[in-house]
Amino acid sequence: MNVGLCTVSAKERPVEEIVELASEVGYDGVEIWGRDHVGDGSEPVCTRIVEAAAAHGIDIAAYGSYLRCGTEAFDDELEHELAIADRLGTETIRVWAGNQEYDGRDDEHWERVVADLRRVTDRAADHEIEVTVEKHDNTVTNCLEGAKALIEAIGDERCGLNYQPGFSIPAAELEREAAALAPLSNQLHLQTTRERTGRDRAALAESYYDLAAILNPFLEHGFDGYANVEFVSDERPYREAIEADVACVRSILE
């Protein structure tokens, strides 16, 4: 398992600065935020990011796009987002699964999400890129059942889940969820709070859930993707916060 840092963790900083800091404190890679940090996604912008990563000996773990399967915008955005991922030289693009939660989905929306996800998986493969699907509220992957059903519906090793522990879920349920979804996941996002349903991000070492218990099923399954720290506590300087979180994850992996 590799440890990465999402550049969305510092939206206001230049992406090159985040890449440098991530390298200095011990991350293996970065997930590039698919909004301000890539701008228009042009070749010069992406080349600058690629050169910064190379200069600091760090991988571009993923492109964190906002391509959303099952929506009207999908067709218009598909090729543009894949082109950005290709320019960044990453092996993974993050996408989203619709805008309805699993229990409230209608059949038409579900079928469209599945069809779009199959399509982006096939097209991404033409660029030698795999797809990771965000597990998130307000999408069909909001719960264990929805995430499992969607990845199994695609049934393609080039498409996996971007698993992340949700703050509204009890710790014991998160452990059950992680065990069930680890075999279907190809990427993780890590962030936390001190209390369930809390709003203020905390250091991973102060999480209300047991991070080791979340990561262990992935390690047991032979997960070789990235665990990306997505957001960090603002109670300490940014460099200290990202350094503390990578150290926390490394302590579990060791």
Image: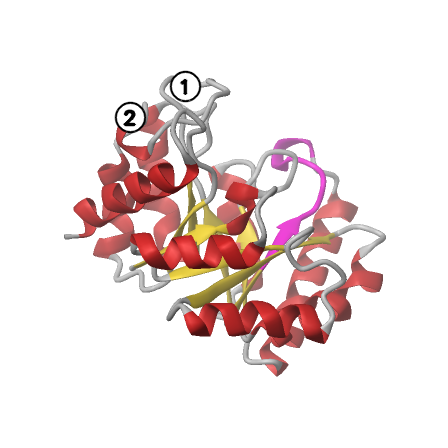
Q: Is residue 4 left or right of residue 247?
A: right
Q: Mark 2 or mark 1, which is nearer to you? A: 2
Front residue of 82/30: it is: 30
Q: Is there any visible trace of residue 185 in the rendered image?
A: no
Residue 11 rendering spot, x and y as whole percentages = 59, 43
Instruction: Name the colouring of the figure.
Output: secondary structure
What residue type is disc 2 on? Answer: Glu
Q: Quadrant of residue 22?
A: bottom left
- Image height check: is 122 above or below 33? below
Residue 224 rendering spot, x and y as whole percentages = 32, 64
Q: Is there any visible trace of residue 136 in the rendered image?
A: yes
Mark 1 = which residue? 196
Gap in Å between the C-alphas at discs 2 and 1? Answer: 12 Å
Q: Quadrant of residue 223?
A: bottom left
Q: Is residue 39 left or right of residue 251?
A: right
Q: Residue at position x 78%, y 47% from top?
A: 108
Q: Is residue 187 left or right of residue 121?
A: left
Mark 2 = which residue? 206
What residue type is disc 1 on? Answer: Arg
Q: Are marks 2 and 1 in contact (CB under 8 Å)?
A: no
Q: Is residue 109 left or right of residue 237?
A: right
Q: Which residues are magenta?
A: 94-104
Dot 2 crowding, Cα within 10 Å, few <14, some 14–19, many 20+: some
Circle 1 — which element?
loop
Dot 1 crowding, Cα within 10 Å, few <14, some 14–19, many 20+: some
Front residue of 179/55: it is: 55
Residue 240 rendering spot, x and y as whole percentages = 34, 38
Q: Quadrant of residue 234?
A: top left
Q: Residue at position x 72%, y 58% from top?
A: 39
Front residue of 222/56: it is: 56
